Amino acid sequence: MGLIDRIVSKAIGRNVSPGEIVVINIDAVYAQDGTAPLVIDVVEKELELKRRVAVERAFFFIDHSSPAPHVAAATVHKEMRRFAKEYGVKLFDVGYGISHQVVVEDGLVRPGMVVVGADSHTPTIGAIGVYATGVGSTDAAIAMMFGMLWLKVPETAKVVLTGAMPKGVMSKDIALHIIGSIGTDGMLGRAVEFRGDTLKYLSVDSRMTLTNMCTEMSAESAIMPVDEVARKWLNERGYTIYRDVDWEKEDGYVDELIVEVSKLEPVVAAPPDVDNVKGVGEVSNVEVDQVFIGSCTNGRLEDIEIAARILHGRKVKDGVRCIVSPASRKVYMEALKRGYIDILASAGCTIAPPTCGPCVGAHMGLLAAGEVAVATTNRNFPGRMGHRDSKVYLSSPAVAAATAIEGRIADPRKYLS
């Protein structure tokens, strides 16, 4: 059995097989301001008298249209605050952070848990050995009400990463390379389990980028073993109590993909889709109007650090807007403490609060018709970040920072000693 099979088997007390439908206890469930309204509607119809959800770890996040850009969003936020107070749901209000980042860094989810989120990028948290999958708002509501849900155990595909990371290559480049190779439906209906010697070079920040981008391969979930790197990260934060499975055993895969990381170079995903992947040299003539560094994909401390490293002592090119949004308040505060925010602001970047806003085309960085952006986000289909006639190129924070300096898609390696 793969890691997810073993987590599910342990949770229900018997061995399971891929394709099997199980009813399983849910350890944590969360929703955000784009999906919470329907969760509220469903729960309140069923729990009008009880007014209490069943799951102890039930969370709401105001992170998408945050802070509220218009009255409609403000009204949704008000309803979420009311519901959370009445039903015992923990609310993370404006500015606290993006859901997938917060549940990991705050220790709200732990290895071996089964977690569902009303957001497609919930598999992000599989980076620390969690079986996490995105569900619709109705399923999230059912999980909140009953503390359990039916799930179909996915088949697991093994992705083996080999070799050390070359200069200027980040985990976003690995993810884009994979998507470019297999397509946006390459892992449809499957879970992705990452293995290989490259993992020892990947921080938890980097790992979360990889598991996050598995959604763009159409994977239902993604997971990594709790190895020495993950255990060190957990121990440093006092997250020492969690369910253990056989993390080292590699078995139960329906397919295997080997990626020679040591041979990769910085890449971008050109519009109109994530699998249109090209080396930065192929698109170095593309001029940009905006650069965005942030989101649940690349708004972590490691991402802010590499951007500050490249922009230190340099300036954002005149005529280019560079927006930086840390993924959480904790990331923001640590970046402040280390001087990264000062470096970025001095370079001409606009520092935004923790928000999904630009990524989902809500606010704080929308594109007009004909404008071009490089973004560290996860999707670039037409209209994703504004007007349908705008264009978005997806990249790592390193490529994004280099691009901000040159005003055209740039190779970050020239700025890294």
Image (tube, helix red, strand yellow):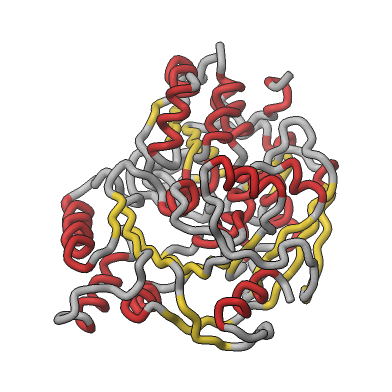
Q: Nearer the viewer, residue 232 or 337?
A: 232
Q: Which residue sits at x=70%, y=63%?
A: 193
Image quadrant occupied by the N terminus:
bottom right
Residue at image coords 57%, 88%: 21
Q: Position of residue 219 (x, y in %)?
A: 62, 68
The part of the image, by quadrant, that contains residue 402 is: top right
Q: Is residue 303 in view from this perspective?
A: yes
Residue nearest the viewer, comparing 222 with 182: 222
Q: Please identify the quarter of the rendering in which residue 236 is found.
A: top right
In the foreground, 164 or 185:
164
The answer to whether 296 appears left or right of 258 in the picture is left
Can the viewer see residue 383? no
Q: Is residue 20 above or below residue 168?
A: below
Q: Residue 54: x, y in percent?
A: 32, 75
Residue at 32% of width from left, 59% of height from top? 60
**Residue 308 drawn at (x, y percent):** 55, 23
Q: Residue 398: x percent and y percent? A: 62, 32
Task: Please report the residue visible at 56 percent of the width from the left and 82 percent of the height from the top.
Answer: 12
**Relative to residue 10, is residue 195 drawn left or right?**
right
The C terminus lies in quadrant = top right
